[in-house]
Image: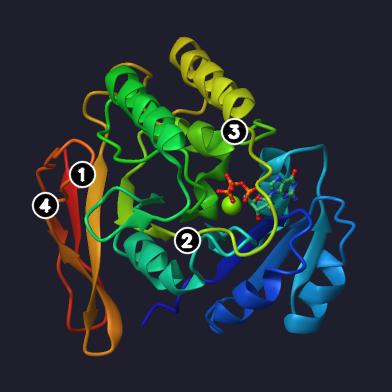
């Protein structure tokens, strides 16, 4: 029997000392390594993290911004699978098995969606929802794929696909860049429902207008630029971009995956699903692909 893939969890953190004690203990113990990318914190983030999770690895980010931090963490990661997690309590480590199962079920790249049935958010004022919805619509129009969410920091992927993403973003546009480049590279992408909680303590580092403009510029730049490492020629595959729709369900105490027609709460958009694998009951997963 093939051994289980190893999993690296990458956490960008800038002054999150008060939040980490609520986040780190929830990370499943089978995770191979947890990497905290410190953004020059001055509140004891590193000391608290070491106290709460002695096995944690630290890396000092190169450059500034969440994008730079994540890229530093990805370079340091050694696992087969990389999962991105926020340090502020917004993303639930309890959802990690759903992301990993979707990758094991055949996806190359898995993105959390707050707008799939079963997902949600308590951390998005109306104006941010409006911005995100506009960007989602733009990405659908320009790149296909049928995403239901875009500017959300809960993603996971096989580390082997990193070279195809060629990430170079520095700030909060990094998630948009990953999501769009995954489409451009012709990766098999899954969305899993995810719930975003409010950050527990502290204030957001995101500035809505400034960072919204960075996202907008990224979308347009990605439309104009070709990605040299794309698995398929840019343009020809965009309409047929493969989006898997996978909904986690509990199967006799284990996380399983169940094929479902996903309905975006935002637009009532139904994605056609078609089973590509079915080994539930053996602890494996099923995946559905909308083409
Ligand atoms: N290392 C590092 N981490 C960062 C940087 N900017 C943000 N982060 C971390 O990235 C994660 C997300 O950033 P937030 O400031 O919570 O942004 P947000 O989630 O869009 O905003 P809220 O919804 O208000 O929480 C958190 O864990 C931050 O600590 C940075 O420049 N360096
Ligand atoms: Mg946050």
Q: CA distance from mark 2 to mark 3?
A: 30 Å
Q: Is mark 1 within 8 Å of ligand 1?
A: no
The answer to whether residue 27 is left or right of residue 118 is right
SS type, badge 4: loop
Which mark is drawn over residue 166? Answer: 3
Name the disc covering residue 264, or none.
1
User: Does dot 1 land on a helix, a strand or a loop?
Assistant: loop
The answer to whether residue 227 is visible is no
CA gap between label 2 and label 4 equals 25 Å
Q: Earlier in the sequence, mark 2 or mark 1?
A: 2
Which residue is at 14% across, 68% downward? 278
Circle nearer the viewer, 3 or 1:
1
* Mark 2–mark 1 distance (CA, rounded to whole Å): 19 Å
Q: Are marks 2 and 4 in contact (CB under 8 Å)?
A: no
Position of 61 relative to 178 (above/below): below
Residue designated by label 4: 261
């Amino acid at each position: 029997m093939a051994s289980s893939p190893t999993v690296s969890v990458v956490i960008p953190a800038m002054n999150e000392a008060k939040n980490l004690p609520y986040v780190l203990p929830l990370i499943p113990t089978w995770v191979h390594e947890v990497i905290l990318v410190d953004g020059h914190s001055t509140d004891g983030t590193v000391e608290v993290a070491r106290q709460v999770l002695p096995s944690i690895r630290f890396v000092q980010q190169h450059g500034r911004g969440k994008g730079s931090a994540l890229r530093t963490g990805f370079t340091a990661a050694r696992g087969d699978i990389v999962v991105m997690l926020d340090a502020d309590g917004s993303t639930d480590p309890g959802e990690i098995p759903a992301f990993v199962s979707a990758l094991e079920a055949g996806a190359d790249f898995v993105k959390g969606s707050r707008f799939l049935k079963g997902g949600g958010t308590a951390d998005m004022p109306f104006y941010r929802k409006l911005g995100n919805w506009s960007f989602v619509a733009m990405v659908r129009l320009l790149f296909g794929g049928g995403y239901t969410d875009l500017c959300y920091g809960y993603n996971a992927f096989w580390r082997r696909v990193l070279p195809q993403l060629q990430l170079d973003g520095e700030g909060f546009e990094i998630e948009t860049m990953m999501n769009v480049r995954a489409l451009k590279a012709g990766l098999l992408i899954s969305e899993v429902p995810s719930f975003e909680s409010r950050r527990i303590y502290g204030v957001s580092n995101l500035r809505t207008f400034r960072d919204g403009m960075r996202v907008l510029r990224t979308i347009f730049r990605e439309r104009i630029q070709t990605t040299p490492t794309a698995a398929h020629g840019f343009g020809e595959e965009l309409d047929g971009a493969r989006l898997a729709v996978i909904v986690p369900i509990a199967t006799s105490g284990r996380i399983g995956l169940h094929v479902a027609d996903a309905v975006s709460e935002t637009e009532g958009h139904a994605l056609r699903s078609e089973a590509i694998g079915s080994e539930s009951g053996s602890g494996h997963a099923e995946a559905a692909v909308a083409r």
